[in-house]
Image (spheres, rainbow, N blue to C red):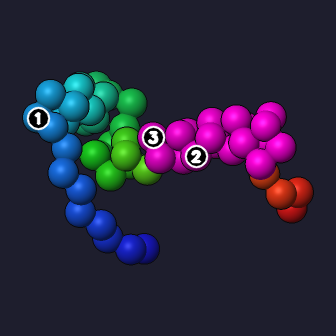
Amino acid sequence: MAKISVEIPDELLADLDEHVGDDGKFVNRSDAIRASVRKTLDVLDEIDQRHGRLEDE
């Protein structure tokens, strides 16, 4: 698995951290960010498909 580095504003990181840990939805920040990227890409694919910009697989 590749590692990347991103800069995130402190406010956004604080919001993210509210969803991470024993009481959160995600085990760690990496899991939360991966889930967010997957969801965003799915939404963008749906938009592209509606506009005929996505090739059939």
Seen from the viewer's position, the closer of residues 39 and 23 is 39
Q: Please report the bounds of the magenta region as a residue range.
A: 35-53
The image quarter containing residue 16 is top left
* Residue bearing mark 2: 41
Q: Is residue 31 above or below residue 17?
A: below
Q: Are marks 2 and 3 in contact (CB under 8 Å)?
A: no
Q: Residues within 10 Å of mark 2 (few under 14, many from 20)?
A: few
Q: Position of residue 21 (x, y in %)?
A: 25, 35
- Please name the predominant secondary structure of the magenta segment in the image: helix
Q: Secondary structure at mark 3?
A: helix
Disc 2 residue type? Leu
Q: Residues within 10 Å of mark 1 (few under 14, many from 20)?
A: few
* Residue bearing mark 3: 36
Magenta-span inclusion, residue 7? no
Q: Which residue is at a point 80% across and 34% down the rendered structure image?
A: 50
- For the residues marked 2 and 3, what is the alpha-carbon distance in whole angstroms? 9 Å
Horizontally, residue 40 falls left or right of residue 5, namely: right
Q: How many marks?
A: 3
Which tag, 2 or 1, sits closer to the chain's start?
1
Q: Position of residue 28 (x, y in %)?
A: 29, 46
Q: In the rendered view of the protein, which quadrant contains the C terminus?
A: bottom right
* Residue bearing mark 1: 10
